[in-house]
Amino acid sequence: MTAKIILNPYASRWKARERIPEVEAALQAAGLAYEIIVTAYPGHGITLATEAAAQGFNPIIAAGGDSTYNEVVNGLMKFAGNGHSPVAFGVLPIGTANDLADNLGIPKDLEAAARLIATGKTRPMDVCQVNERYFDNNSAIGLETSITVIQMNMKHVHGIIRYLLAALIGIARNPQWQMKLEWDDGVYEGPATLVSVGNNPRTGGIFFTVPHADPFDGKLSFIYGSVPSRLRLMGLLLKLLKPDQGNITEAPEVHEVHCTWLRIHTEPGTPVHSDGEVFELDLHDLEYRILPGKLPILVP
């Protein structure tokens, strides 16, 4: 069948647009029948993915970074939510961080990634939902999303260093919230600095915010904690860089939970992101849930 490639030209600060000939060469070398369409504005990928699925394209491939993957996943989930069979999803990593691709072991080399797509091998991956928005990798409120807003507004710093610099600025500002969290068999009410929900362990290119998250276990994994000290937050930043021993979940202020749903009320309101894309700047009530094995994804 013909693959639809939904390419975000803005990914990696417009570098993705320059790589279109490279993308086409990789797809042709892999022997794939394909059509490429380019997104024109934020959110366009959602519409294009829904339309491509309705037109019978399979698989549907997101070419870009994590925000591009997120839009295409939202479009595919919208299509499947109307009673249709799910469509295979794949990625061509040409973004900045490419967290989903790295978490799943999808190669960044475009020829290798295209060959992977050509195999047609899929695995049913969990998809997470926050309110009406789906995400495949990570979502958060509190400090993490405040940092995301900071890095989005950086115009002259690029690459992974942008995420790290934004984290330092966010820690210096040290915002705090009062939250009530409820999940399957637990509740917490009190001060909170961060809540991070992971379908995969890594976000922002280098931060293992939910290091034990597994996108194939049918569980919603999250961490939460209250860290009022800037100095202590700096120490925790170092733990966020560690996927294994010494990671963030070993800090006494941080708690890790695996569940199927999570409801949050927060004062004041907080920004919210899904896969790095901020979709609300001042939200007070959120509901997360897990959709086990909802998305057939092309993986090694």
Image (cartoon, rainbow, N blue to C red):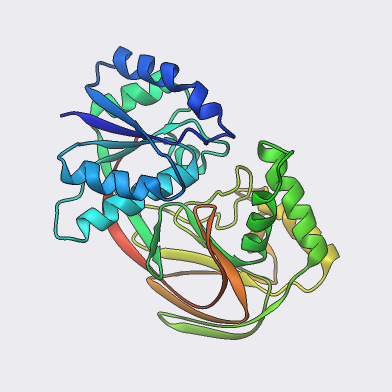
Residue 283 visible, this orientation: yes
Q: Residue at x 43, y 53 (%)?
A: 214
Q: In this figure, what is the number of numbered marks?
A: 0
Quadrant in which the C terminus is drawn: top left
Quadrant in which the N terminus is drawn: top left
291 versus 246 height, above or below? below
Q: Residue at x 31, y 49 (%)?
A: 47
- The answer to which of 49 and 223 lies nearer the viewer is 49
107 versus 222 height, above or below? above
109 versus 259 height, above or below? above
Left or right side of 119 for 188: right
Q: Residue furthest front?
A: 40
61 versus 164 height, above or below? above
Left or right side of 30 for 65: right
Q: Where residue 240 appears, x then y in whole percent?
A: 67, 53
Residue 125 visible, this orientation: no
Left or right side of 219 for 146: right
Q: Where residue 215 appears, x then y in whole percent?
A: 39, 52
- The answer to which of 231 and 257 lies nearer the viewer is 231
Q: Residue at x 78, y 68 (%)?
A: 174
Q: Where residue 76 appears, x then y in whole percent?
A: 28, 50
Q: Where residue 61 appears, x then y in whole percent?
A: 32, 36
Q: Residue at x 48, y 32 (%)?
A: 9
